[in-house]
Structure formats: structure tokens, C-alpha cells
């Protein structure tokens, strides 16, 4: 949809999985939410996209695991596919979530903590 009054051209709607202990394909469903959003952004020739920490609020997904899945998925797609996306931002609610994403980024990329 359009961004309305937001400073965004579009809003890409996605729904992540409800955490049910990890035995119901939650990881695959979460990765798919990021993958499909990135695909839609690329199809609309967007240069940037922002994500919240999908499913980690009311849906109860463990933040550290969700961060690894999010970053692994995003990094993989940006490395392996031709895409107009040049910037991915994670908009995180609190410092605990931010720290989890920093640790996951280091783990996924092998680089220094952000």
C-alpha cells in the first residue's frame, strides 16, 4: 500500500509466525516473511526497506533467534540476488532487542559488533 502520511513511499504488510515452541516451522515461516517482503520491495524497485523485529512482540518469538533468522535471511538475499535494495534498516523497540540484533549481525557476518 502507499505510505500515507509516513515518510515512506510504500508499506509492505507481512505477518510473522506465532511462537509455539519451535516445532511448527516457525523459523521457516519467519524467514519467509522477510524474504517475501524483500522480494516485493525489489519488484517495486525500492532502494531501501525498514523492518521491525517481526513476531517478537505479541507473537512471543524469542528475540535472539528471531534476530539471527532475520539477519541471515536479509544478508543471504542481498548477497545472492541482483536487487535494487541498497539499505536495510531494523527499527527496534528497546535496547535488549538492539543488543540481540548486534550480536546476531556479528554472528551472521563474522564482522565486528555494530
Image (cartoon, helix red, strand yellow):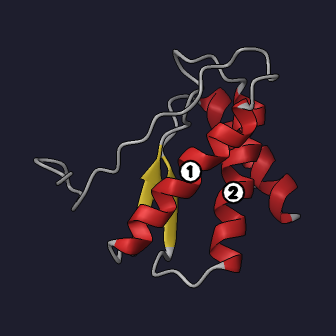
Mark 1 neighbour class, 10 Å CA radius: few under 14, some 14 to 19, many 20 or more: many
Q: Judge left or right: residue 90 versus residue 29.
A: left
**Residue corresponding to mark 2:** 73
**Residue corresponding to mark 1:** 34
| Viewer-proximal residue among 83 and 93 | 83
Q: Position of residue 27 (x, y in %)?
A: 74, 37
Q: Is residue 114 visible?
A: no
Mark 2 neighbour class, 10 Å CA radius: few under 14, some 14 to 19, many 20 or more: some
Query: Which of the 4 image quadrants contains residue 46?
Result: bottom left
Q: Position of residue 37 (x, y in %)?
A: 47, 55
Q: Mark 1 near mark 2, Cβ–Cβ under 8 Å?
A: yes
Q: Is residue 2 visible?
A: yes
- Above/below status of 58 relative to 99: above
Q: Judge left or right: residue 100 versus residue 37.
A: right
Quick one: SS at disc 1?
helix
- Above/below status of 94 relative to 98: above
Residue found at the far left of this picture: 5
Query: Which of the 4 image quadrants contains residue 68?
Result: top right
Q: Earlier in the sequence, mark 1 or mark 2?
A: 1
Query: Which of the 4 image quadrants contains residue 101?
Result: top right
Picture residue at 43% right of the left edge, 41% below the top: 14
Q: CA distance from mark 1 to mark 2?
A: 7 Å
Picture residue at 48% right of the left edge, 65% below the top: 39
- Above/below status of 48 relative to 84: above
| Viewer-proximal residue among 94 and 52 | 52
Picture residue at 38% right of the left edge, 73% below the top: 43
Residue 26: which disc?
A: none
Amino acid at each position: 500500500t502507499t505510505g500515507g502520511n509516513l515518510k515512506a513511499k510504500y508499506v509492505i504488510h507481512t505477518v510473522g509466525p506465532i511462537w509455539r515452541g519451535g516445532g511448527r516451522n516457525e523459523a521457516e515461516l519467519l524467514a519467509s516473511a522477510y524474504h517475501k517482503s524483500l522480494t516485493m520491495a525489489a519488484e517495486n524497485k525500492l532502494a531501501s526497506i525498514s523492518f521491525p523485529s517481526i513476531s517478537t512482540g505479541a507473537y512471543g518469538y524469542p528475540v535472539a533467534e528471531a534476530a539471527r533468522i532475520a539477519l541471515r535471511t536479509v544478508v543471504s538475499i542481498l548477497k545472492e540476488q541482483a536487487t535494487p535494495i541498497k539499505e536495510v534498516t531494523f527499527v527496534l523497540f528497546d535496547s535488549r532487542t538492539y543488543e540481540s540484533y548486534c550480536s546476531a549481525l556479528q554472528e551472521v557476518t563474522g564482522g565486528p559488533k555494530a
